[in-house]
Amino acid sequence: MSETVSDADFLLTSRGKGDELGAWVIGAAFSRDGKAAAFALGDGTMRIASTTDITGEWNKVEVHDGACLSMVPDVSSGFLSGGDDGLVARVANDGKVDEFAKLGTMKWVDNVAAHPDGLRAASVGKVVHLFGKDGTLFRKLEHPSSVGGIAFDAKGKRVAVAHYNGASLWFANSKDGSAKVLPWKGSHQGVWFSPDGTHVVTTMQENALHGWRLADAQDMRMSGYATKIKSVSFTGKGRWLATAGADCIVLWPFFAGGPMGKPPVELAGGDGVLCTQVACHPQHEVVAAGFDDGLVLMAEIGSGKVVPVAAPGRGAISALAWNPAGTQIAFGTESGFAGLVDLSKR
């Protein structure tokens, strides 16, 4: 990577905007309609940017009385945010904040999730709260330990929940019924469905991933990382799973039988700097990655070609996202810097 560092700020300075926001950037996302980008901060505020004028003024929005803990694109536009004040907030593209749900004082909303069909979920402690298309709470999903992560499958029919000693699968629209438990000892944190719904993958407290092939509950253990994995992302068609946690982008093959017994592909490594965030392009087999020194780059899986987006020096990358069209990248750092880059031809 070192040979590109001197020119690494070209895209950020020529096609984007960066700003010091003053607090840890815990999340970056684009609205599902592609009209806004958002950065959620550890001081409880968000910054909202118009994607049609990314160099314009970013809107500072007061959201939580405390820290933002999680933030995702909402159902059709805007954003859903959870905070340590027990609030689930909906923030519109224009910055208007509405209280979506108040899950109690002195309770942390650790995880939120939303599906385009209208379902939303939020976790507090061991409980996932499920909200229907009309916004009303219709189910509470109890787990044996604190919830580490929540994910809807692509169709919005199932919810996966990570927790201690495994993950639980629930049918989202069922008002009763029990979970199918996917067991594996240890503390499971983030959770993801593969795009085709055939696999579930979790990140663990140890330096490893774990996965299950749902057809036969076959276990998949993906280990050998230098540190805890904070970020994973499937490519648009689900052929590859990109992961952080090593001094390169690690990609596991999810085609031709899956990753069992197969070595991963490694991209953009060599400097010994840990990759902290990954985000796969929504259509092409391209991965954006952020590193512990603040470098942001794009890597093409087929060719291994690397293109820098932003130079090192602004703090470890803590948030990274593509817009739905795959033409813009948003990123944020632990030290409070945020950047927005437009890659479209102009």
Image: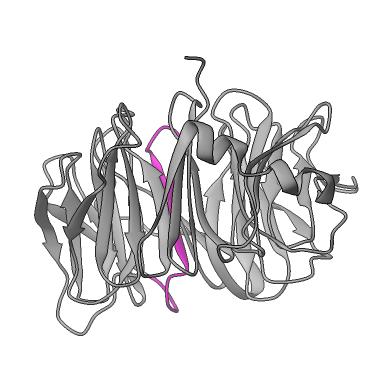
The picture places residue 312, in percent across and down from the top left corner, at 65, 57
Would residue 5 be found to the left or right of residue 140 on screen?
A: right
Between 115 and 78, which is closer to the camera in this rendering? Answer: 78
Helix, strand or loop: magenta stretch:
loop
- Is 142 magenta? The answer is no
Q: Is residue 67 visible?
A: yes
Q: Residue at x 52, y 33 (%)?
A: 14
Residue bounds of the magenta highlight: 143-159
Between 45 and 294, which is closer to the camera in this rendering? Answer: 294
The picture places residue 326, in percent across and down from the top left corner, at 51, 27
Q: Residue at x 42, y 69 (%)?
A: 24
Q: Is residue 170 visible?
A: no
Between 151 and 52, which is closer to the camera in this rendering? Answer: 52
The picture places residue 311, in percent across and down from the top left corner, at 64, 51
Would residue 101 be found to the left or right of residue 230 on screen?
A: left
Would residue 128 be found to the left or right of residue 303 on screen?
A: left
Looking at the image, residue 134 lies above or below residue 68: above
Q: Residue at x 65, y 53 (%)?
A: 295
Q: Residue at x 69, y 52 (%)?
A: 243
The picture places residue 20, in percent across and down from the top left corner, at 40, 60
Give the tally of numbered discs. Answer: 0
- Is 148 magenta? The answer is yes
Furthest residue to the top?
A: 346
- The type of colouring in the image is one colour
Furthest residue to the bottom?
A: 106
Q: In which quarter of the view is residue 273 placed?
A: bottom right
Looking at the image, residue 250 lies above or below residue 139: above
